[in-house]
Amino acid sequence: MAFSTFTLSLYLLSFILLLQTVFGADPIFHICSTSDNFTSNDPYDINLTKLMGYLSYKTPPTGYSLSSMGESQHQVFGHALCRGDVSDVDCASCVTEASKKVRDYCSYNKNGIIWYENCLVKYAKNSFFGKIDYEHMVYAWAVQNVSDPSSFNPKVRKLLRELVKKASESPKMYKTGSLKIGEGRTIYGLTQCTRDISGSDCKACLKDEIKRQPACCDGKQGGRVMSGSCYFRYEVYPFVNA
């Protein structure tokens, strides 16, 4: 069974993000399968444990890794992605924590995905490598509104569209940038994809998410749309490491 399709209404998630900013490394959100479980210490459980250990070890040097463990009905597939600007140490810490927490939250579920500020981890009983994840979307936005949404919103989308092309052509499938919008104000943006998908699929994934931006965060000072394959974020303040 695939993950349940989920789009989060983000008054709650905005509060979660605020808590994360204040208190540290709490997950942004997670999604688990609603059925199709395994039991403790069965072959799937053992393979999932091995997979999570592998992802925690292999992801930090490059910021992305994928693998599968086991065979037949006991096989499990997974990948981990770190935000393109985080250090190896922070990447390792995030993936290790995410690998643990997704198993805590998705106890005995054969599918799970978790998003943190610095990384995401996803696993499933069926291979999802090389496929755009259009099913699992999480929206987040800032509580504060901008004073001039009719001018601000098109500039946000202009910046994100510019970053889409650059990210899809980058070896890391990651790009950040900024756009001055007058009177000393600047918008900062980020686009990133998982590296199992092609450059053209990266572009398609991000374009689909940007189409969702009006429903997500029109008129908000910051926003993001995240899936299992790509995500964008924008803010009115710098939020990535130089």
Image: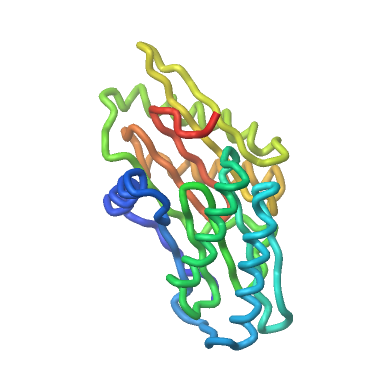
Taking 6 as reference, is 192 left or right? right
Residue at image location 67% in from the left, 68% down from the top: 127
Find residue 223 and report its image quarter. top left
Q: Residue furthest front?
A: 89
Q: Is residue 179 visible?
A: yes
* Residue 239 placement, left or right of 218: right
Q: Residue at x 33, y 25 (%)?
A: 150
Q: Residue at x 65, y 48 (%)?
A: 63
**Depicted 39 relative to depicted 214: above or below:** below
Look at the image and name its color scheme: rainbow
Q: Nearer the viewer, residue 76 or 165?
A: 76
x then y, percent, for residue 181: 41, 17
- Left or right, 181 with respect to 19, comes to right
Picture coordinates of residue 97 (x, y %)? 50, 60
Q: In this picture, is 101 found above or below 204?
A: below
Q: Quadrant of residue 180?
A: top left
Give left or right: position of 59 versus 138: right
Residue 28 seen in render: no
